[in-house]
Image (cartoon, rainbow, N blue to C red):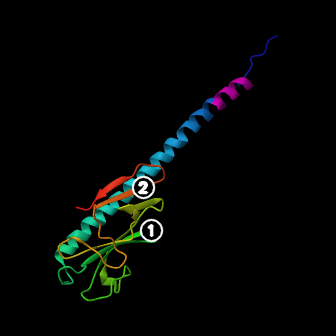
Amino acid sequence: MRQDARGFTLVEVMVSLAVMLILFLAAVPMTISWSNSAKQRDAAGLLQQGLSRAKALALRNPGAVAAGQPSVALCLSGGTISLLRLQPDATFSCTPAAEADLQWSAAVPSAASIKIDGADFHCLALDNRGLPVSVGDCVATSSGTFNVVVGSEDSLDVTLI
C-alpha cells in the first residue's frame, strides 16, 4: 500500500530558500544604489531650482540694492535650502530678518552633501547683475560648479548659470 505524499520535501524547501536568499542578497546593493541616486537627483534638482530662482530674483533686484552689493542669498542650513532677499545696507545673515525676506525654501534630502570648490556649501550671494559676490561666509565661486554627493555615488555637478 502506497500513500500519495503531499507537500514539499525538506530538500526542495531548502533549495528554494537558498535561491531566494541569493536573489535577495543581489537585490539589496542595487536597491541602496537606486535610492541614493534618487536622493542625489532630488538634491541636485532643488539646488538647480534655487540657483535659477536666486538669479532671477537678483536680476529683478526688489530691494533696490546698489551694484556690487549682495541682492539675494541662497543658504543651506539644517537640511533646508533657502532663498533670501537682502535689504540695502543691512548686516548680512542667512537668517531672514523678516518673513517677507524669505522668498523660497525646500528640504534637501538628509543624505545629500553639497560642495563647491571642494568645500561644503553654506551660502551663495548674488549682486543685482546675478553675479556671485563675497560676503560673510558666502563663497564667491571661481568654477561655478556645485557637486552633489550621496553615499558612494559619483558626484552630480550643477552649474551656476
Q: Is residue 64 left or right of residue 150?
A: left
Packing grade of label 2 (10 A; few <14, some 14-19, many >=20) is: many
The image position of residue 133, as x and y in percent, is: 26, 74
Element type at mark 1: loop
Q: Amino acid at mark 1?
A: Gly
Which image quadrant is residue 45 in?
bottom left
By secondary structure, the bulk of the magenta-drawn segment is best described as: helix
Which image quadrant is residue 83 in?
bottom left
The image position of residue 100, as x and y in percent, is: 30, 83
Residue 6 can be seen in this image? yes
Image point (34%, 74%), residue name: 138
Element type at mark 2: strand
The image position of residue 68, as x and y in percent, is: 20, 79
* Quadrant the N terminus occupies: top right
Front-most of residues 138 and 58: 138
**Image height check: is 5 above or below 32?**
above
Image point (74%, 19%), residue name: 5
Query: Label 2 belongs to which residue?
Result: 149
Image point (20%, 71%), residue name: 130
The image position of residue 4, as x and y in percent, is: 74, 17
Query: Label 1 belongs to which residue?
Result: 79
Q: Which residues are magenta?
A: 9-18
Check residue 35 for magenta coloring.
no
**Image height check: is 64 above or below 107?**
below
Image point (34%, 86%), residue name: 98
Check residue 10 for magenta coloring.
yes
In space, the residues marked 2 and 1 are separated at their CA atoms by 14 Å
